[in-house]
Each structure stands twice: as structure tokens, then as C-alpha cells.
Image (tube, grey):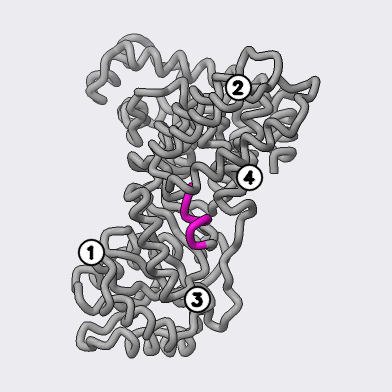
Amino acid sequence: MFDSLSEKLDKALHTLRGHGQITEINVAETTKEVRRALLDADVNFKIAKEFTNRVRDRALGQNVLTTLQPGQLMVKIVKDELTQLMGGENEGINLSGSPSVILMSGLQGSGKTTFSGKLANFLKTKKSKKPLLVACDVYRPAAIDQLHIVGEQIDVDVYSDKENNDPVAIALAGIAKAKSEGHNVVIIDTAGRLAVDEKMMAEISDIHKAVSPQETLFVVDAMTGQDAVNTAKAFNDILNFDGVILTKLDGDTRGGAAISIKSVVDKPIKFIGTGEKMEAIDIFYPSRMADRILGMGDVISLVERAQEQFDEDEARKIQKKIAKNKFGFDDFLSQIQQIKKMGNMKDLMGMIPGAGKALKGLDIDDDAFKHIEAIIHSMTPDERSNPSKLNVSRKKRIAKGSGRDMTEVNQLMKQFDQMGKMMKMMQGGGGKKMMQMMQNMK
């Protein structure tokens, strides 16, 4: 996410490192490089220029604190300005209606239908809502089928009517169904086009007027850069939508849309999509995104994801097993499954401060654990429960059964042993300190 922009901003801000003081000359050099980095990321020229002018004025208007180097101060200023540029504060979703109606809009291919499912899943699992998905794309039967498939995946009801070509009537019927069946949220997936056209805008406007949604969200593919911003403006002129959803942020995105869109349409980014799984949805926090763009990671979001996935009762059972030296490979496998639920590995690594730079160029596969899982699944239940029984002949059998090399089996055994020792040490007091740190980060 934003790898190229992060690298270029890091180089730009490197200009001031090692300088004893801020001067007009070194600030001018730095802001010039920052502006170039933003333009390369497909940020609008006017926005990039205004941004760097604010950064320059703030930098020259401040004395460097004794605890800060000029480079550190410039990073802080750039971070603060990036946060403001992307919206400042997080803005939540309005769920005040009965039922609450959410209208999804956007071009074809932006990921609108998939994200409708992700949002339904988010509201169901995180907000304890009972959503209903409504299929209003009357032009593409495949889009209706896709929404039904998504609904089955997340166990959420879908309303559609393939015999009806009137999207307004379908939307109203969907809301009526929600009221009669106790659904408290309705998410209406509308038709998209390959480009903005009058027919499309008139249709989405008619649906909007008929259903009076509590939230109208514009879904945009973050990989389209400045085109995304221009499309958002066209939709906003017609719908006056409430917020933006950026999809495909896990792809090779330059970041221009995320940085520019708030300034152009004056509407907040509310959610982002970070992968293909139904759980790959994050609330958008401008400050946290600014941290990630500047290579500072996003520890708070990482901790929040961990807290969502790791069961407290299960954690207590694991602690007891560690204390009794009974932590086995089945327990290890369970921990791996919970880590995988947190999201794609590249995204998780990006949340760790400095990891993006350290892992630059490495292809972090979502199946990074598959070799470990294959080795563990090749063990007998008794071997998984009692790792100490794994002698050379057993290891050879496991290596053959999993299709892995003997060195990989030995390496896993070594890592498992080291992890066990570390977890025991944490139980001796280090774990409490870690939990205190996590609480302070909330």
C-alpha cells in the first residue's frame, strides 16, 4: 500500500536529516521533493502545491524544539498536514433509520458489489446488525448472481427480482421486505457503467430520491488515481453523497485518490478495502493512514485486529498449557489460523513500523503459512500433542508426507521451541508489560 509514495517521501524528508537548523534553502529543497513525490502519486497539481506551501510556511514559522531535529520536525509537519488533507478525523456511518438505508454508487469494476457484501458482513459481525442486500443492477444478471453468492458466503439475505427492470421499484420492494422481516439495515447495490453517462446518473438519482437513504456511499477503485477523484466529483454533483469507499488498496496503488479526494469533493473517506476476503474492510482513519504513508506503521489498527480475532478464553487455555509445558502443535496451528483471519500478510506487515522498508522487494504471500501447516498436518495426533517424541525417523516420515525438505522440518521444530521459551518468559511478567502497552495504544 503506497510503497512508491512512501519511498519517495522518505527520500524527500531525508534532505533535512543531519542539518542543525531549518533554513529557507533546505526547506525549499525538501518541499520541492515532497511536491514531486505527490505528483508522481497522481495527486492533483493544485492540491500538491497548496499542501507543500502549508508545510513550508509551518516549517519556517517554527523554532526547532530542543528534543527534535529539523528532519523530525518536518516529518511531524508533513504527517499533520497529510492527516488534515485526508479528512482530519474519522467519520462514522449513519445508521439512524428503521431500517437504515445505505445506497451504494460507483462505476462498473470499482468493486461495488463485493464491497456491499463486505459492508454487510462488517455491520453484522461488528455492529450486531441484521442487514439485507438488495440487487438493483437490472442490466447485468451476473451482478445479481454475484450478490447472491456473496450473501451466501456471509450468511446475509439478498433480495432481487430478475423479472423486474425498474431499479426504483426493486429498491422500494427490498426496503418493504426488510421492514416485514426485521432487517434493520438495507444495502442497495446499484448498477455501474464503464464511464459516467446521463442515463446512469438519472437512474441513481431516481433511486436516491425514492428511498431517501441515511447514507449514500461512492465506491471507487483506488488504483485509478486522479480519474477516481474526477469520477467522485461527477457523482457528488448529482447525489451529494455522504462518504467515499476506496477499494483495492492492497493493489499497486499510487495513493493519489486517497490523498486528493477529500479536498476535491469535501466528503470523508469512510472505509477502505484491503483484500478479496469478506473480512478485508477497514474503517478509514486519516491519522493512521498518514503514519503508514510515512513508513511509521499502524500499530493501533494491528492491535485492534488482533483483539478482534484472538479469543480471551482460548488465550487463557493456552497460557495454562504453556505453564504446564503442554503447548503442542495443535495449539500452534490454532494460533496460525487466527493470525490468517487478521488479513493479508502484506497489509499486516505494513502496519509494523519500519517493516515496509525492511521488506521492500519481497513478495509476501498470503499462503506464507501453508508449508508449516502441511508439516503439522503430516504429524500424528500424538506427535502434535507431544513434540518431544519427534525423533529423526519420525521427522523423515513427516518431511516425506508433507512434501517438504528435512531442513524445513528441523527449522520448524527449532522455531517452535524458541517460541515456547519466549511465551514462557512473557508469562513471567513480560506479558503484562506488553498488555499494558497495548492498552495505552488504544
**Which numbered disc flags the more N-terminal residue, 4 or 3?**
3
Q: Residues within 10 Å of mark 4 (few under 14, many from 20)?
A: few
Residue placed under numbered mark 3 in the picture:
185
Q: Amino acid at mark 1?
A: Leu
* Closest to the observer, 357 or 438: 357
Report the magenta residues as a range.
Answer: 259-265
Quarter of the image for the N terminus: give it: top left
Apparent side of residue 164 relative to residue 211 in the rendered image (left or right): left
Determine the residue positioned at 52% across, 55% down: 263
Find residue 408 and report its horizontal and vertical position in percent. 33, 16
Q: Nearer the viewer, mark 2 or mark 1?
A: 2
Residue placed under numbered mark 1 in the picture:
194
* Closest to the observer, 104 or 126: 104
Give the CA separation, mark 4 to mark 3.
30 Å
Find residue 215 and report its horizontal and vertical position in percent. 51, 73
Q: Nearer the viewer, mark 3 or mark 1?
A: 1
Determine the residue positioned at 48% across, 58% down: 264
Apparent side of residue 269 relative to residue 43 in the rendered image (left or right): right
Q: Nearer the viewer, mark 2 or mark 3?
A: 2
Does the CB distance between marks 3 and 1 fall below 8 Å? no
Total numbered circles: 4
Give the CA separation, mark 2 to mark 1.
47 Å
**Which numbered disc flags the more N-terminal residue, 4 or 1?**
1
Q: Amino acid at mark 3?
A: Val
Q: Quadrant of residue 301?
A: top right
Apparent side of residue 119 relative to residue 308 in the rendered image (left or right): left
Residue placed under numbered mark 4 in the picture:
312
Q: Nearer the viewer, mark 4 or mark 3?
A: 3
Q: Secondary structure at mark 3?
A: strand
Q: Which mark is residue 25?
A: 2
Q: Is 300 above or below relative to 203?
A: above
